[in-house]
Image (tube, helix red, strand yellow):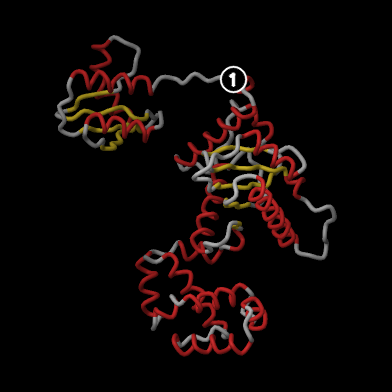
Amino acid sequence: MEKQALQLHIERILGKKLVPLSVPTEEWHDWTKAQDFERQSSAPVVMHQRNSNWVLLWKSGTSTTELMQVDEHDLTEQERQWIELILWMEHQPKPVLPSTHLGDEQQALMLGQWIIERMREGDGSAEVPDTFSWKNKMFTQVVPFLLVAEHAHREGPGYKDLYRLMKSYFGGDLILLPLSEKEWFILCPEQLTQANEADDDEDERETMEELLTSFCLGLYELLANEWVGESHLSIGYPFSPVKGMPGVVAQLRETIYLGRTFHVTDNIHLPWELHLERLVNSISDEVRKQFLQRVVTKADSFTDVETMATLGTFFQYDCSVSETAKRLYIHRNTLLYRLDKIKHETGLDVRKFTDAVLVKLILLLYKVTK
C-alpha cells in the first residue's frame, strides 16, 4: 500500500491525524530496545508508546528514521493490534517476481510505477534498477513524449492498441509506459525521428526543434483521429533513459501544465516555446499583483474579447500589422484603429518593442494571477 493511502486509512480508523516525526535511528533503537528484549522476536518493533503518545515506525533509515505520532490518544487493544499488523506487513520485504518472466505490458506497468514513485520522492535523476530486464533497452538515445488523454466519458485504449498505433506512426519499435489511466510516457528511438537528409546550412538545434515539432504535430493528428480525440501532447529533447527518466517526465508534465494554463486552445505543448511562460509562472502571486497595479492603469482594457483576440494574434505573428490584419480578416486600417484605441486606453503602444514586451507580460500575468 502507498504511504499516503496507508496514512489516510489509519487516520480514518482512529479519527485522528498522524503527525510526522523524524529522529536519529540510534535514538529509535534506544526507545525500542526494551521492547525487543521482551518480545524475543526477530520481527521489527513497529509501534512504541512514549509518555502519553504512540509512535509508529514509518520508514527506516541508516541515519534517520521517519515516524508517525498519535498525540494523546488512548488506543484500544484491538486498534493497537490492527495497526501493528498493518505496519508489520508494510515493513516486510516485498516478493519480487523476476522481470524476465513478465510480458511487455507488465514490464511497462512496473517501469511506469517506478517512475511515479521516484517522482514522489523527488529523485529525478534516478537510474533504472538492474531488476528490470528492460534496462538493456535504456542505453539508446530516445525522444520522449508525454501524452495526457481527456477521455472522461469514454474508455481509453489498451496498451496493445496504443503501442500498435505508435509503432505504425514511427515505423519501428519504441517503449510505451503507462503512468496512469490517462497519462502515457513514450520513448521513441532517436533515429526514427531523424530527417533523411541533413541540412548543413541550418543551425543544428533549430533543425532538431523543427523536426521534433513536426513529429509532435503529426502524432497528435493521428491520435485525435484514431484514438482518444481530445488530448495533450508534449515532447522533449533526446536523452538516454537509463538515468533521469523521472526528471524528464516531471519536465514534460510542467510543459503541459504551462501550455494549458497560458495557451488554453492549444493541444501541442513545446518546451522551447514556453520560456517566458515558465518565468512568469515562477513569480509569486503577490509580486504579480504589485506589478499589475503599477503598470496597468485601466484593467478593463485587457478583459475585452476583441482586444484580447487582436493582441493575441498580433503577438502570434511577430507584431506584423499586415499579417495580423490578414489572419483576423480585417482591413489594415481597422487593425491600426484598434491598436490606437489600446494605446489611448492603456498608454502602451504595442508597435514599440518595450511596450509590446510589457503588454505581453500583462496578458500572461492575468492568466495566472488570482
Secondary structure of residue under mark 1: loop
Q: Name, please, the residue furthest toward the front.
A: 153
Q: Nearer the viewer, residue 332 or 144?
A: 332
User: Which quadrant of the rendered structure holds the C terminus?
Assistant: bottom left
**Residue in the image at 69% along x and 42% along y:** 166
Q: Amino acid at mark 1?
A: Pro
Q: Residue 363, percent across and down?
A: 48, 72
The residue under the point 71% across, 40% down is 140
Q: Nearer the viewer, residue 18 or 262?
A: 262
**In which quadrant of the rendered view does residue 34 lie?**
top left
In the picture as drawn, the residue positioned furthest to the right comes out as: 197
Q: Position of residue 233 (x, y in %)?
A: 60, 52
Q: x, y (%) of residue 39?
A: 26, 11
Mark 1, other Cα within 10 Å: few <14 / some 14–19 / many ≥20: few
Q: Quadrant for residue 243, please give it.
A: top right
| Percent position of residue 341, x then y | 49, 88
Please state which of residues 177 and 357 is positioned toward the viewer in this rendering: 177
Q: How many marks?
A: 1
The residue identified by callout 1 is 98
Instruction: Give the side of residue 164 with respect to residue 200, left or right.
Output: left
On the image, which quarter does residue 293 sit in?
bottom left
Q: In the picture shown, does residue 356 fall above or below 367?
A: below
- Residue at point 54%, 83% (across, down): 350
Residue 348's place in the image compared with 273, above or below, is: below
As drawn, 161 above or below 261: above
278 sits to left or right of 35: right
Residue 367 position (above or below residue 126): below
Which image quadrant: the N terminus? top left
